[in-house]
Structure formats: C-alpha cells, structure tokens
Image: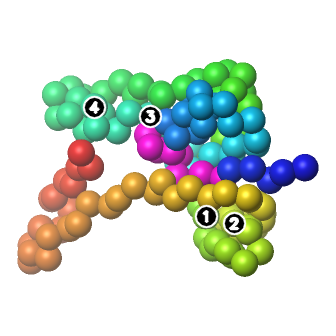
Amino acid sequence: MTNGMVIIGAGECGGRAALALRDLGYEGPVTLIGDEPHLPYERPPLSKEAMASDAPEIKAIASDEILSERSIRHIHSVQAMAIDRAAHVVHLSDGSVLPYDKLLLATGSTPRKLPMPGLGARCVYLRT
C-alpha cells in the first residue's frame, strides 16, 4: 500500500493541484490539508468582490461530493506543524501524523504589512 501524495495548503493552488493529479491519471491516495474550515475556493475573485459588495459569494473549486468522487481526502481546520522528511510524515496540529510518499507545499503567501506607525487596526490587507 502506498501513502500517496499529501498537499499542504487547501487554497486555490492546492485544490487545483489535487484535481490536476486525477486529471493526469494519478491513481494513488491524494490528501489535501488546510487550516481553514471550508473547501478550497477562488481567492483572487473573492478579494475583488469584497471591495464591491457587503457579502461576497465564496466560489468553491470543488464540492465535497466531487472531492469524494475523485478520491481526494480533504482534511480541514488543521495546520501542518512539522515535516519529517527522513520519516516521510507530516505532524498536524490535532496531534495526528500523516505519512506521505510525495509532498507538495501549496501554502500560498501572507501579505507583508508595512512597518508604519499608527496603522494598527485601521488597515486592511488583501491577498490578490
């Protein structure tokens, strides 16, 4: 039995990578790990829509049903805390340990906050 592919980062890139693996014929296990409580969604449109309306619609890349049909395991609301490359395991924030054969880091980025005095809570940073 193979441990398959683990993708750390269930954002747009991680979600699309998991689907692309299946599109390209990869048959091994695929596990998608994300620290957010929801499905992977399209982030760039979300940031633009947030400026245009009060409640932007979150468009998921794939539903739970599609992920299940494509045999993609989605673990949400946990963080990858450590990677043991020698043992081929990922340690998760819930205490579990996830083995892998191949690992993809798709964690995205964090906006760089400007070091300007007085900005504090009045500033909003968007990822685009």
* Residue type beneath disc 3: Tyr
Determine whether, in the image, residue 86 is placed left or right of residue 63: right
Disc 3, SS: loop
Q: Which of pointers 2 and 3 indicates the residue nearer the eye?
A: 2
In the rendered structure, which disc, 2 or 3, sits on the residue that comes first in sequence? 3
Residue 92 visible to an observer of this rendering? yes
**Could you say which is closer to the camera, residue 72 or residue 39?**
72
> Where on the picture, by quarter, is residue 100?
bottom right
Dot 1 surroundings within 10 Å: few (below 14), some, or many (20 or more)?
many
- Magenta span covers which residues? 6-15
Query: Please, what is the three-letter code of the amino acid marked with disc 1?
Result: Ala
Q: Residue at x 56, y 56 (%)?
A: 104
Q: Is residue 10 left or right of residue 103?
A: left
Is residue 13 shown in magenta? Answer: yes
* Residue type beneath disc 4: Pro
Residue marked by disc 3: 41
From the viewer's perspective, tell me whether residue 69 is left or right of residue 10.
right
Select label 2 or label 4 by which is in front: 2
Residue 49 circle label: none
State if disc 4 and disc 2 touch (CB < 8 Å). no
Going from N to C along the chain, the mark reached first, 2 or 4, is 4
Badge 2 is on which residue?
90
Asked if the residue at tag 2 contacts the one at tag 1, i.e. Cβ–Cβ closer than 8 Å, the answer is yes
**How much space separates mark 2 and mark 3, taking CA atoms?**
23 Å
Where 63 sits versus 37, above or below?
Answer: above
Asked if residue 14 is among those painted magenta in the image, a careful observer would answer yes
Labels 1 and 2: the sequence-earlier one? 1
Tell me the residue that label 1 is attached to: 80
Most extreme residue toward the front is 25
- Give residue 62's quadrant in the image: top right
Residue 37 spot, x, y in % from top left: 56, 43
The crowding category of the residue bearing disc 3, from other C-alpha atoms within 10 Å (few below 14, some 14 to 19, many at least 20), is many
